[in-house]
Image (cartoon, rainbow, N blue to C red):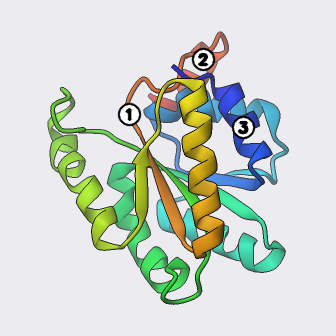
Amino acid sequence: MLSGNTFVETVLEAGISLFCGVPDSVFRDLCTSLDERLAPDQHIITANEGSAVALATGHYLGSGGLALVYMQNSGLGNAINPIASLASKNVYGIPMLLLIGWRGEPGTPDEPQHVLQGLMTLPHLDAMGIRHSILPPEIDSAVACLNEAVEAARKDCCPVALIVRRDTFESSATQVVADKHFE
């Protein structure tokens, strides 16, 4: 499993300067690490996933900086319009890293409301032409995957997604406090 702190450090080293999105249980440790390590203007929790994509777009247009947008796969539907009408390389070509928690992953037990979303996650990304890969839980492989995704986002001027399976991030000692936000 990945440590949230190690992942955040790796993402910062890759040149990501803004983190925004909608918290989800898949990202508990990651969100705790973001809150502990970043200034409030570097980690912004948004009202919905579309707002996070719009914020990442504005961040890039205003500063040239890359943002990481995190969301549960059920929030991908909220992000489709701003991705397709703003960030797509066929429109304004906004590079960003999408970190998508994969609830309802096929073959993995989950709540009934996540099953269809889990089946549709990769096909939705394919239909939008968003390059994607599954984030490995081992640090060396995760770093390579992350760096490849950031490089592709910059080179192709478009969103690139990393899919995060449940239990990819480990729980930290401060997790008990953070769990209150995800109940």
Q: What is the C-alpha distance between the residues marked 3 and 2?
A: 20 Å
Q: Which mark lies nearer to you, 1 or 3?
A: 3
- Do callouts 1 and 2 mark residues in contact (Cβ within 8 Å)? no
Q: Sort mark 1 into few (<14), some (14-19) or many (20+) by Cα contacts within 10 Å.
A: many
Mark 2 crowd level (few <14, some 14–19, many ≥20, 10 Å Cα): some
Q: Amino acid at mark 2?
A: Gln
Q: Which mark is residue 165?
A: 1
- Could you tell which of marks 3 and 2 lies nearer the N-terminus? 3
Left or right: 116 in relation to 156: left
Q: Residue at x 48, y 26 (%)?
A: 137
Mark 2 lies on a secondary structure that is: helix
Observer-nearest of 136 and 68 = 136
Q: In which quadrant of the rendered view does residue 9 lie?
A: top right
Which dot marks residue 85? Answer: none
Q: Nearer the viewer, mark 1 or mark 2?
A: 1
Pick the quarter of the image with the C terminus: top left
Q: Position of residue 85 (x, y in %)?
A: 46, 85
Depth check, front residue: 33 or 105: 105
Q: Which residue in the structure is indicated by mark 3?
A: 10
Inspect the image, locate mark 3, and give the three-letter code of the amino acid beneath it.
Thr
The residue depicted at 34 percent of the width and 41 percent of the height is 102
| Residue at image mark 2 | 175
Mark 1 or 2, nearer chain start: 1
Residue that appears at 61% across and 32% down: 30
> What amino acid does circle 1 point to?
Arg
How far from the left and from the top, in percent, is residue 111?
20, 32
- Rounded to the nearest angstrom, the CA distance separating label 1 from label 3 is 19 Å
- Residue 83 horizontal side relative to residue 107, left or right: right
Is residue 94 something that shows in the picture? Answer: yes
Q: CA distance from mark 1 to mark 2?
A: 18 Å
Label 3 Cα neighbours within 10 Å, binned few <14 / some 14-19 / many ≥20: some
Labels 3 and 2 touching (C-beta < 8 A): no
